Image: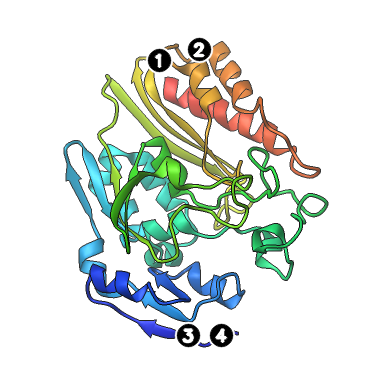
């Protein structure tokens, strides 16, 4: 059951900022995750501030200076179908296509996918876990087959977003609006590890909201390899057991520059510096690829029921790097 709440639909960005100043107000974009969180009392709101009245201003994809600007309310379906996204950063289009079902992609927005809440069944259930302010993470001694193997510390969720790893690999930035004005943050910098604060996923405050996502021009080279791969239990609709976003500037089989980001591995989209170091400046030979797969999982610490993720990630890294070399 939903608790009673007030509903506001501002017509300007400044009005939305003003409306969010109210105690208990939360922003409502596509709402596909927010409604579930309200029903499950993950979020307690006394006022929903809908951004639907700003759709014309905060939606769409614009190509400029070799990069892209994506409005925060742009739907995932629009991103999947947009020719500029597919031409300049196909890995982002692939990631958006991997989100949920067609119905959810029609409703869900890029900003909402970045900021969604974790899907841990203890957090979503009736457990006073550490992410809700409780004493412990119940996954430690419980059902943890879908939990993290990197970066867990005191809470072992995995970040559920598919587009966030793809955007991090592309070195994207977010424009964020709030009472203090407008700021621009790298997407890599907004995510918060549980060891720093187990009750928050991002540094975006309750009274702030994303207005745009900027993808810069990518490293120049003879070839740009940009992909997103997701492995999941159910092909039709599920969250990642393992995932890998690659954005690599290639010269033949040699990696000139780029980034590699794991999904389904950690409480945040996990940039694998170890994988990057193993391939940077090198030709993707079978030996280099094998060493990169091992490096990507060198720091993994599996829980009692999710050690299967380590060979799963290694196999996926090998396959995706082999494709990059082809």
At x 55%, y 52%, the residue is 160
Disc 3 secondary structure class? loop
Position in image of residue 231 (x %, y %): 58, 43
Label 4 to label 1: alpha-carbon separation: 57 Å
Distance from the alpha carbon under mark 3 to that under mark 1: 56 Å
Colouring style? rainbow
Dot 2 corresponds to which residue? 285
Sequence-wise first label, 2 or 3 = 3
Distance between the Cα atoms at labels 2 and 3? 58 Å
- The quadrant holding residue 247 is top left
Q: Residue furthest bottom?
A: 4
* Residue 55 badge: none
- On the picture, is 236 further left or further right than 152? left
Is 319 or 136 nearer to us in this picture?
Answer: 136
Kind of element beneath mark 2: loop
Front residue of 174 and 325:
174
Q: Secondary structure at mark 1?
A: loop
Contact flag, marks 4 and 3 (Cβ < 8 Å): yes
- Asked if labels 4 and 2 touch by Cβ distance under 8 angstroms, the answer is no
Image quarter hosting the N terminus: bottom right
Residue receiving disc 3 = 5
Residue for point 43% across, 48% down: 163
Residue bearing the label numbered 4: 3
Residue position for label 1: 253
Assess whether mark 2 and mark 1 are in contact (beta carbons under 8 angstroms). Answer: yes
The answer for how far apart the CA atoms under marks 4 and 3 are is: 6 Å
In the visual, does 53 lie left or right of 23?
Answer: left
Q: Nearer the viewer, mark 4 or mark 1?
A: 4
Tags 3 and 1 in contact by the CB under 8 Å rule? no
Q: Is residue 249 above or below residue 115?
A: above
Residue in view at x 24 percent, y 48 percent: 69
């Amino acid at each position: 059951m939903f608790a009673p709440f007030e509903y506001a639909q501002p017509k300007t960005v400044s009005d939305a900022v003003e409306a969010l100043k109210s105690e208990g107000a939360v922003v409502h974009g596509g709402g596909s995750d927010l409604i579930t969180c309200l029903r499950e009392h993950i979020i307690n709101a006394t006022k929903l501030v809908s951004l639907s009245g700003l759709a014309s201003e905060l939606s769409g994809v614009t190509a400029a200076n070799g990069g892209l600007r994506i409005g925060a309310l742009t739907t995932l379906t629009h991103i999947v179908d947009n020719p500029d996204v597919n031409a300049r950063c196909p890995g982002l289009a692939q990631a958006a296509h991997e989100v949920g079902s067609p119905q959810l992609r029609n409703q869900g927005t890029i900003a909402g996918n970045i900021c969604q809440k974790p899907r841990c069944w203890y957090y979503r259930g009736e457990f006073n876990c550490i992410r809700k302010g409780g004493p412990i993470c119940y996954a430690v001694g419980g059902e943890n087959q879908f939990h993290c193997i990197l970066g867990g510390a005191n809470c072992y969720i995995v970040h559920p977003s598919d587009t966030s790893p793809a955007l991090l690999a592309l070195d994207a930035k977010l424009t964020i609006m709030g009472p203090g004005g407008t700021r621009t943050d790298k997407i890599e910098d907004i995510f918060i590890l549980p060891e720093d604060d187990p009750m928050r996923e991002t540094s975006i405050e309750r009274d702030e909201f994303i207005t745009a996502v900027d993808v810069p021009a990518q490293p120049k080279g003879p070839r740009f390899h940009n992909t997103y791969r997701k492995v999941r239990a159910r092909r039709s609709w599920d969250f990642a057991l393992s995932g890998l976003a690659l954005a690599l500037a290639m010269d033949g089989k040699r990696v000139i520059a780029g980034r590699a980001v794991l999904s389904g591995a950690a409480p945040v989209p996990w940039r694998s510096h170890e994988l990057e170091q193993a391939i940077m400046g090198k030709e993707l030979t079978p030996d280099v690829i094998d060493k990169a797969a091992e490096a990507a999982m060198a720091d993994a610490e599996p829980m009692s029921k999710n050690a299967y993720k380590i060979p799963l990630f290694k196999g996926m890294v090998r396959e995706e790097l082999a494709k990059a070399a082809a």
